[in-house]
Image (tube, coloured by chain):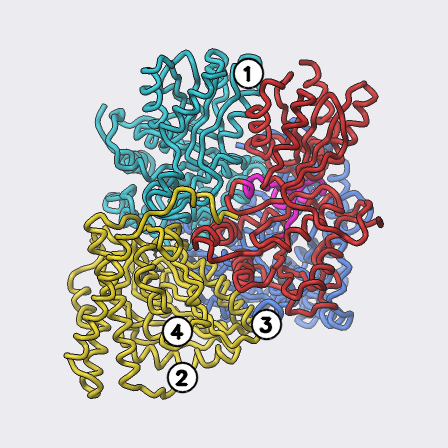
Chain colours: A blue, B yellow, C cyan, D red
Amino acid sequence: MARHVEVSSDLARRLLATMWLCRAFEEKVSELIANNEISGLVHLAMGQEGTAAAIAAHLDDRDLMFSGHRAHGHALAKGADPSRVMAEIAGRATGLCRGKGGSMHLVDVAHGFLGATGVVGGNVPNALGVALAQKQRRTGRVTVVFFGDGAAQAGHFLESLNLASLWELPVVLVCENNGYAEFTPRSAHTRVERVATLATTYGIATETVEGNDALAVHRAAAPFIAAAREGKGPALLECLTYRMRGHYEGDAVKYRDAAELDVWKAKDPLRILERQAAEAGWFGDADARAIERSARARVDEAAAYALASPWPDAAWLMEDVR
Amino acid sequence: MARHVEVSSDLARRLLATMWLCRAFEEKVSELIANNEISGLVHLAMGQEGTAAAIAAHLDDRDLMFSGHRAHGHALAKGADPSRVMAEIAGRATGLCRGKGGSMHLVDVAHGFLGATGVVGGNVPNALGVALAQKQRRTGRVTVVFFGDGAAQAGHFLESLNLASLWELPVVLVCENNGYAEFTPRSAHTRVERVATLATTYGIATETVEGNDALAVHRAAAPFIAAAREGKGPALLECLTYRMRGHYEGDAVKYRDAAELDVWKAKDPLRILERQAAEAGWFGDADARAIERSARARVDEAAAYALASPWPDAAWLMEDVR
Amino acid sequence: MSEMTPIRAINQALHDEMTRDGDVVVIGEDVAEGGPYGATRGLVDDFGRDRVRDTPISEGTVMGVAIGLALAGLRPVVEIMFIDFITLALDQLANQAAKARYMSGGQLRVPLVVRTQGGAGVRSGAQHSQSLEAWLAHVPGLAVAIPATAADAAGLLIAAIRTDDPVVLVENKAMYYRREEVPDPLAPVPLGTAAVRRSGRDVTVVATSRLVAESLAAADALAGEGIDVEVIDPRTIQPLDEETIVSSVARTGRCVIAHEAVRAFGVGAEIAAVVQERALDRLQAPVLRVGAPFAPVPTSAPLEDAYLVGREQVAAAVREAMRW
Amino acid sequence: MSEMTPIRAINQALHDEMTRDGDVVVIGEDVAEGGPYGATRGLVDDFGRDRVRDTPISEGTVMGVAIGLALAGLRPVVEIMFIDFITLALDQLANQAAKARYMSGGQLRVPLVVRTQGGAGVRSGAQHSQSLEAWLAHVPGLAVAIPATAADAAGLLIAAIRTDDPVVLVENKAMYYRREEVPDPLAPVPLGTAAVRRSGRDVTVVATSRLVAESLAAADALAGEGIDVEVIDPRTIQPLDEETIVSSVARTGRCVIAHEAVRAFGVGAEIAAVVQERALDRLQAPVLRVGAPFAPVPTSAPLEDAYLVGREQVAAAVREAMRW
Ligand SMILES: Cc1ncc(C[n+]2csc(CCOP(=O)(O)OP(=O)(O)O)c2C)c(N)n1
Ligand SMILES: Cc1ncc(C[n+]2csc(CCOP(=O)(O)OP(=O)(O)O)c2C)c(N)n1
Ligand SMILES: [Mg+2]
Ligand SMILES: [Mg+2]
């Protein structure tokens, strides 16, 4: 199913920049949590940056994206201002959602990020509805929704496969299959190893790719995105990946062993892309480090912005209810 | 997948007797509704009697059964006393549920009929739980749940496929695929023509049979029932059938044409079985008519019993709440 | 003025609004076939299957799809055939629709309308007869309308469609086929405004849905006993027009609340709490509540009849209030 | 007596009951791993995966499976990780579990226990912080317990497990790790019996869950102002121990109700309605309600702090009641 898509040095740079932004951003979030500057229930996606970057690279601001509880990278990749994302996670007045949403509920309408939700599987029907509206209005906008392998056992997801198929919705369902739902491995939740299999049943186009190979994800997504842009679909792209940290910050991670983590550390998506760039002769370590440094600088700025920002005014409590 | 199962004249007689009981019973219900002796939301299964009879023929009182809104035949086939079923539908004190349940909520614990539910798809998880209990206790009891093709798009059903598969539950899921959910044909609800396909995805054993051929249903169910009796499973049996009447009594049935009904009238499950019996030389029309007459007599008795029964005492209103 | 049943008025209101605004779409089970009560009858002929969209039996996801349509700027009217099945869609309704605007700091709006119906009396049993509106009124972000007349069934629906935030309309199946006067053309009825259905001096009866007509009948009977009853129909329970209710009770000094739902933890509890909070010193009797007993709805006719409250229970409560 | 946190007491209660009765099984997401709060920690080691059953993220079906287990005579304790997600399981809970016994005319029993937790204060946002217990108390067939102490968290759970009909326990996440006294061994606490947490002459405060400790703190502060507060913890809201509440108010003449849930249509509405119904002539002030404002729970610390009610709001309400 994967067609050949031109891979340019530019694309690799772009992806790497996004991925380093996500990585540096979440390292900073983790640090700020450790320093009690950020509180609440925070889920980091370190190790999964390849999917966010690769999918978003196909999209522009008019395209629409949904995500779940592990959404920082998706919002950033979609173009959200890191300072305002950080401010939101830190609960500040300057946050994307004025501090009312927080880590699990990032929304940035200006960049087409229609939002993250904390209820597993709950975002998929919403994405379908948005895609249906695009189809009826023939806007050519693509709708993408990210979700985990754990969501694939949820009724809302399964009902959605049927509806997406029935109505031929221009939506790309992107499953980040990291092998776990909270503390429990996929094998304890289903006998269906691949999430893609579920979609195939409904006649939905699918592909399963190494999620930590951002270029591969980008390539695999291309035909699905192109179809959606023409109002066709749906498609499901399953990205096999791994979260390097616990389910949430504070998780003692007793349910998996060090060896497993090591295997996946060796498959760190940032290293994979840097190695590919070097091997292809697109750019070397110096450029990669420059990209990393620039990302870290941007994140430092974001953190400084967030922490210097005022807290929300208590009067906002009753605003935007309805 | 279908194995050879001995088909005896006795079995054919037994199935025909059950089917005629169901048919005559529902004809009487329809008549009583027309006469304002029965009120409420009543769904008849005329045309679908083959599945109820064939599945129940494998079971005894210790086995457990669930059904949905179209459940009269299932309860009767499982052994419920026609008089008490009729009394329940007529809202009388002598009804199985003392009049508190009615047509959509028949329950007969003594005969293992754990009940019908009015929420489409809602019975499947309950059946799974009952099957799980049998498995853990190694009782050798089989759990069967009947549902329609419309239920196959419901989240509870889809989540249940996964759980039944994951836990290898000794449950037989029997889909009566009559091509419609209320007034809408299956093609407007899904691109997945066969419900069995959905189960196959989860590695569940399936078979799709002509539901109006009771002997074929009986044959197809045999290995599934046998496996469940050994604590193994799950399985899904899809029975292609048709309801000859409207979705509910009172439905003007504007959504399908006479030609379609005629096709299926020619495939009336009672006629099919009578023809098979005649062709095989098991018994002829005289015997069939005797079976029919005896069913009608039993149903007349049931109706008389129901209508002569007292109404529930208003004091019962607050009993059995908790 | 013309004569119409509530179900016909709803149908007409949908037709009018779909004609007026191309963004209005109807979605739900069997809606293209008109639905079991005929609320959407004929719409598909005029507006096609894209705007009158049949769905499979997937209430939760269909609600979610409707929310997505609303997020994208359409104005979906989703039908949940029985309020009993809204239990399957509450994650989407309460966690997504009701909170999206707030959680996004005002970036998102969800102009979603949910039409559903509840109520007993037609021998359909415990899973097809509930009155769950109190649940919805407890969810910040939702508005909840509960029409008692054909004019309001249409008018509140029109207002809901023109609202930029989610509104749930809870109709009552037992009232669908009564002929009543409605304005011609149908007109919006603002959310949050109670209607005084009958003026009276002695007791204020606050009644919703089917109990409005029952309370009016009780009032007629009580008039013969020299008791002058005021009947108020809140029309929306969220927001609740506390002013109209409280100022009436401040005048009459007595209040009876009547609804079909189970009394315990029902809408009447909130109204009673508000009335005594705001008008205690005027109360000459406790605020009394008329509602269903704490039991599921039985199917059998005499049991269901014993279960349902109506004019007699309202009249009895009014008489009791008068004895203080 | 020994010292324990509520979460440890719950864990111990489960362990005790599973040891006592081989029919007790635990089922839910990540329960074999102990769950996010540790309520089920270690159980799998003693009772195995058949009795401590991990499930996929399928709340509705898992609830349905638990109902099936209960119908078959087991005593499942199903965990819904956050009460916010009970929205996905309400069809099974309200339509099947709550009604099975009734609809079957008493043939079926559903000895189901649902453990879940709600409450805000930990910056987890609008979808992980709700208090939805009022919904459940409106459903005939369900009992609803809402423990405020470690002893009750365990004791009500034990009682629930030994009950033949469905019981939902709504814990509060913010209280899980406070050390408190519990009886040794843990003992059942009967459903439907309120606890008088503090005796007082002037005002009755009826508080649930986290607000019990807050109300006791308020009472201490108010004692310094010469106001003698009685604090009552209903412990179960369905059934509700009206006697204990009403007889207290009959003595004090004043009543404040405090809970974390949204005030409108919350548990306090029912209690206020009951109190004025049964003790109007004793009331020297309106029954006042302390509860959350009508908004989703915001995530940001200062907003969430502004959202949450606590000892100050209780004290203010008591002072207001005293002014009458
Ligand atoms: C409906 C629902 N049930 C349970 C939870 C609690 N929960 C949060 S994340 C999670 C696991 C999700 O797994 P997956 O979808 O694979 O995403 P991942 O965390 O691996 O990225 C669970 C069970 C939830 N948020 N929503
Ligand atoms: C959850 C739910 N949604 C909607 C309904 C209304 N309803 C009753 S029967 C039915 C169609 C069911 O179709 P199917 O499962 O194929 O069974 P059939 O009626 O054809 O036997 C619908 C939509 C319901 N009872 N439950
Ligand atoms: Mg995962
Ligand atoms: Mg069907």
CA distance separating discs 4 and 3: 24 Å
SS type, badge 1: helix
Quarter of the figure with residue D251: top right
Residue C149 covered by magenta stretch = no
**Residue placed most toward the observer, B89 or B248:** B89
SS type, badge 3: helix
Residue type, label 4: Leu
When the figure is inspected, residue C116 is found, relative to residue B302, above or below; the finding is above
Magenta part of the protein: which range? D115-137
Q: Residue C36 appears at what percent x and percent y? A: 29, 47
Cβ atoms under marks 4 and 1 closer than 8 Å = no
* Mark 2 burial class by Cα count in 10 Å: few <14, some 14-19, many 20+: few
4 or 3: tag closer to the N-terminus: 3
Residue to which mark 3 is pinned: B136
Q: Chain of mark 1?
A: C
Residue to which mark 4 is pinned: B237
* Residue B127 falls left or right of residue B313: right
Q: Chain of mark 4?
A: B
Mark 1 close to ligand 2, CB under 8 Å: no
| Label 4 in the same subunit as label 3 | yes
Q: Nearer the viewer, mark 4 or mark 1?
A: 1
* Mark 3 burial class by Cα count in 10 Å: few <14, some 14-19, many 20+: few
When the figure is inspected, residue B271 is found, relative to residue A101, above or below; the finding is below
- Image mark for residue B1: 2
3 or 2: tag closer to the N-terminus: 2
Residue to which mark 1 is pinned: C279
